[in-house]
Amino acid sequence: MFLLRSLGNIVFGSADGNLIELPSGQLFFLDPSNPTATRSLVFRDARAAVRRTPSKHNYQLVVTRIFEEGEAELDDEAVDDDEHTFLIDSVLLLRNKPPAPVSAIAALSKPKMQLPSLIWADTTDDTGTCGWEFVPDAAATNDVTVQLFEEIVFTCMFERAHLKSKAEATDADLQAFVARVQRAAAESSVGVWRPPSAAAAAPAAPAAASVQTPVKGKGADARFATPGSVTSPQPMSVGPTAPSTPSPAGLSGLVGVPTSTAPLAAAAPAAVPAASPLSPPRGPHMPAVAAPAGSPILSVAAELFIYDGAKSEFLVVRDHVNVDILAAESFTYKLVVNDENGPYIVQNIDSHMNAVFSKEHLSFVWVWMDAQQRPTYSWSLRFPITGFEQYREFQRTLSQCMYNASSGGLFSAAKADDQQYIVDTYEDVEMADRDDEDEAEEEEAEEEEDAQNGVSSAAFGEPDAAPERGDTSKNSQLTVGYKHNRSFVVRGNRIGVFRHTDDDELQFATTIKNVGGLDGTTFSPRRVMLHEQDSSLLLMAPNDGQKVFKMDLERGKVVEEWKIDDDMDVTEILPETKYAQMTPSKTFVGMGRNAIFRVDPRLSGKKRVDSESYLYKAPRKFNVACTTGSGELAVASEKGDIGLYNKLNIRAKTSLPGLGDPIVGIDSTENGKFLLATCSNYLLLIDTEMGDGTSGYKKGMGSEKPVPKRLQLKPEHVAWIGEQVSFTPARFNTGEGLEKSIVTSTGPYVITWNFRRVKNGHLYDYKIKKYSENVVSDNFRYGADRSIIVALPENVEMVAQRTLQTPTKMLKSRSNVVNSPY
């Protein structure tokens, strides 16, 4: 033993998501108690792989159906069941089954070589006899690969059980662990029918009743693993906006993880009685917590649910809980969910909860964070049908606490109409009555028909050029050209130029090296902006807040330096209209922490235009800004508020209150009707027109401010991702005509929303694409919302929007099993 050890860390150190793969074989479901089909064929042609998950030391056994050409398109229902995923844990009781002996007569006909098959338990089966069998195709692999596959599975089990890398273990440790697993597997009843009396006397699989691994696809029936629980969870219908994708992703603290080392490990609450046939299951084991200190603000009663990815629905885990909101320390608030044994869930109230309220279902959904602040579970509270006022009071109180915690100020200090604006922003917008499903289907059909390429990738630098010695810089910024089909990517003191081809591919063009000032001092630009019909690039240096540098893109060097002001630092520059970079206009807009102004490089001396400047005396903490097609200006601050200006030398016509979180990016539609503000874990789509069509840029909106639409990932998707959301600045697509799409990213995920459907109330109509590394920046290609340019730390890609998937397809086959409490 260990063929794996002879490979060192080659396999486990690979950057690929799969550690090993059996490229071809058949998958069977074993049910010895079924007299008509003890061994049912599930996939006639499939591949088996061991795959990493986002959680350290946790892996999956994944069996994927292989479709023949055209078969996937013909069988839509089968596509939804094209993969079965199993968390690799010792309770799988994996063993190999030698091939059946060949008879003497069959041997004369030179039979096809057979390989050992792999059998493992169906952990959702109560009898302990059902299981799965993968039979490798001897024409596509060999017995050495099958042996290596089995050993890798055992090694993954070891890592999960001990929460440490195989490299930290000795051969003796690994062999002892594998021997125990193999002995338990040999003694198990998986795939073997035994009468009830014999089955009862058979040795129990270790912890099999404690760890339940839901299996996707046919026969999947995720259940709570609470000993004594004999009933299935009770689903809560969540109507048309119901989540339809797998959920929680980390797996700390679940039963089966050693309690001495697991970050969330905790025994079940004391004195929990065994479930009766009519009681709901008990839910996952949560960390034991004491009742937090604090002043009670509100106490309500509700039902408690948790999202089950295998069933794609919320399941009740407590039919009655008391929910308290407490004021702990200054601007710190706690959500406490109490069951009959005391506090069950305790969590700080802040924007990272990804809170979603639904008036239609009288429910509240949020993400629970573990001790390392990783999103882990998606919970829901549902109020009784007669408890609308109770629901409303809870929503208002929690929204106020969230605002206070984020802003560090008091909700009560805001104006009355601003208070209602803030509270209503947390309400989940109901679906519009209009039937726009046909329109969405037509758009998707157009994307399929017109998009030519899936992904085109281009590396930074000449293909054969060796990297510069000591250069550890990564891509940091992306700006997309409108006029000449070019994109520019900043990496250290270099700028890569990439060409957009007519067939939607991205090609490396050249590198502009040694970016710096006229004195030869090089720097890594902190801000770049295309200017003068994309013929020049304006740069801002990280340590010089008063200058803007002009680079001639034909020559590839800085040709002018402009001192903007003698006393004030410039924090941001932007075009004077949304598409000004396509014109020969020389002027642009500048912004300081407390000021907005026009910049005219043709002036002698300082370039700030005094007559078109407005300087606030009080701190404003301006952060980002954008312009509309007619030159109106929206300025956002670190406090989350937004000012709307129609001139640069006057105060804002309208001030829109924020939710307390800093705004890190802002964009506008060309006609100025909609603003898109980016906060760390949500976007705000803001209508700038009042009910009579008057623009907030021209007249103060007062109490007539339309409620913004809050775009965020569903809490269950955040739990699946397993890390806090941190959106990059979101943008509308650009070009002639009305905007149709929105793009942003978080971590390694690129996310798009269908803007047309969002305006009609479909706030969760988004698609996702995952990369192997974090996304630096992303934007649409000019004039084509079907193509997205994505800057990664090392590469740049142009990806067709059609390659992004709905969460249902994207997440269904991934690590939904990991950390599932069922």
Image: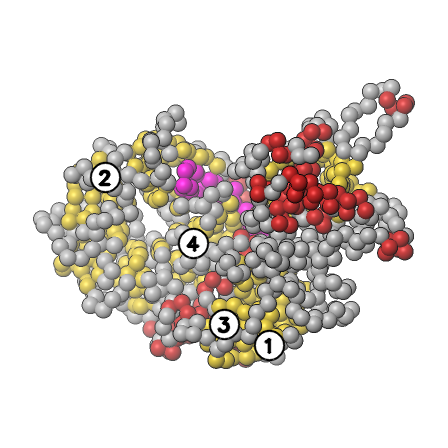
571 sits to left or right of 705: left
| Element marked by disc 2 | loop
Pointers 2 and 3 in contact (C-beta within 8 Å):
no
Please name the residue shown 16% across and 39% down the image: 518
Q: Where is residue 328 in the image (x, y as percent from the top left)?
A: 46, 75
Pointers 1 and 3 in contact (C-beta within 8 Å):
no
Query: Which is in the foreground here, disc 2 or disc 4?
Result: 2
The residue where tag 3 is placed is 334
Mark 4 and mark 3 lie on one chain; the one further toward the N terminus is 3
Q: In this view, does 253 lie above or below 396?
A: above
The residue where tag 4 is placed is 727
Q: Position of residue 359 (x, y in %)?
A: 55, 71
Pointers 4 and 1 in contact (C-beta within 8 Å):
no
Mark 2 and mark 3 lie on one chain; the one further toward the N terminus is 3
Q: Quadrant of the C terminus?
A: bottom right
Q: In which quarter of the image is the N terminus?
A: top right
30 sits to left or right of 680: right
Image colouring: secondary structure
The answer to whether residue 90 is seen in the rendering is yes
* Amino acid found under the numbered disc labelled 2: Thr
The residue where tag 2 is placed is 522
239 sits to left or right of 557: right
761 drawn magenta = no
| Element marked by disc 1 | strand
Label 2: few (<14), some (14–19) or many (≥20) C-alpha neighbours in 10 Å: some
Q: In this view, does 641 lie above or below 244?
A: below
| Element marked by disc 3 | strand
